[in-house]
Each structure stands twice: as C-alpha cells, then as structure tokens.
Image (tube, rainbow, N blue to C red):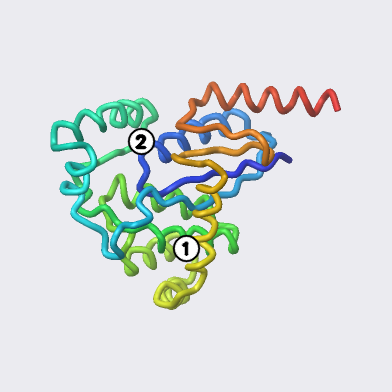
Amino acid sequence: MVKLDILSDPICPWCWIGKAGLDAALMEEPDHPFTIEWHPFQLNPDMPAGGIDRRAYLEAKFGGREGAAQAYAPVVERAEAAGLDLNLDRIATTPNTLDAHRLIHWAGIEGRQTAAVNALFKAYFTEGRDIGDHDVLADIADGIEMDASVVRRLLESDADLDDIRARDAHSRDMGVTSVPTFIVAQRHAVPGAQTKEMWLEVIADIRAQIAKS
C-alpha cells in the first residue's frame, strides 16, 4: 500500500472538487494502492472563533461583490462538472474550522475519517450549515455513527487543539501554501484539484513501479 496524505480544509471548495476527482478514480480502480489520511490546514487560521458573515468575507477578500463572483465562477463550473451539489447562496457564515478539523481527527481514530470529511463538505457546501458550531458538529458526528455526546464534550474542552494547530503550522513550515495538497508516498506533493484522469495515471505509474521492484 502507498500512503496518500491529503491536506485540506472543509470550507475549501477546491478541496471538495479535488476529492471528487480522486473519488472518481478510486471508484474506477477499486483495487487502488492508496491508504488515505486527511490532515488539517486552515485557510483562515486567524478567523474569529464564531466566524464572520460570508458576504462580508468574500467581498473583503476579492475586492467587492463582482470580484467574488468572478473568483467563484470557475469553482461553480468545476463543481457542476464533478456532479457536486454546490449551493453557495445557502452559506451565511464563513466559520473558523479548527473544531471541524478536531472532528476529522477524532473520526480518524474511529476509522471514520473520510466519512467525516464527506459529511463536513456536504453540510457546508450543500446544506449551508455553520460547521464551526458545536451543535452542528455533534450532529454531523452522530450522522457518521460517532457518539455525539462524547464529541460535544470534547469540543467544549481543549482536547487536541494544540495538536491541530501544530500540524497546521508544520505544513506551512514545510512550504504548503494552499490546499488541497496531496502527498504521495511521503515524497511527491501534488497540489490543486486534480482530475480523475490524472489520478488514474498516478495509480498506473505506481503499479508499474511495483511490478518492476
């Protein structure tokens, strides 16, 4: 098996699109060689704990409503091509994702990490839920067969906060500046939302290398 580490943020639309491309390849190649682990990277590490109004955030980031619309046009196009149910108009808040990353970490301990990532993307981009809210995160945990009461208690504590921050900082120290970033076999970084075809090529190359060894 080959380790595939994925640096991602659940409010990053390109991360969702990139996951869709990878998922399509893995469905086509169910005997793929990858063992997948998700890692935290916050697009907005200085975001207030309660998040901010999404419209204000986008307009400040992209220089106004028109700039935001232009910036998201390729996102909408790629999401539609990938068959993703993207409902940007439902999103009222751009959250701080530190607690969402804690949920992904805890889900990984229980073998439900990819399920948590899927559920967070859906909750945010399809349903427009505030994934910085503890009630929402506990409900998401319940939906992937985790103990919501335990998750809620953990969220109300400082459990693993320092670990998530340290892992995020480590990725930045290693030179990661954007997500998604895929790291194949702990050596080869593949940045950006890659297509199914690219991942099929990677899988074919890995199999060829294994056959030679």
Q: Report the quarter where the N terminus lies.
A: top right
* Label 1 residue SS: helix
Q: Which residue is mark 1?
A: 102
Residue 51 falls in which quadrant of the image?
bottom left
Position in image of residue 47 (x %, y %) = 31, 57
Q: Is residue 68 left or right of residue 22?
A: left
Q: Earlier in the sequence, mark 2 or mark 1?
A: 2
Q: Residue at x 51, y 45 (%)?
A: 7
Task: Give the class, few, some or many, for how many residues have Cα within 10 Å of label 2's Cα (few <14, many ≥20).
Answer: some
Q: Mark 2 to mark 1: distance in Å?
A: 25 Å
Q: Is residue 69 left or right of residue 181?
A: left
Q: In the displayed structure, would residue 94 be above or below residue 76?
A: below
Q: In the displayed structure, would residue 186 be above or below residue 80?
A: below
Task: Give the class, few, some or many, for how many residues have Cα within 10 Å of label 1's Cα (few <14, many ≥20).
Answer: many
The mark closer to the camera, 2 or 1, is 1
Q: Is residue 4 left or right of residue 121?
A: right
* Label 2 residue SS: loop
- Label 1 is placed on what type of residue? Arg
- Label 2 is placed on what type of residue? Leu
Q: Report the quarter where the C terminus lies.
A: top right
Decide which of 205, 175 is in the foreground and name it.
175
Residue 130 falls in which quadrant of the image?
bottom left
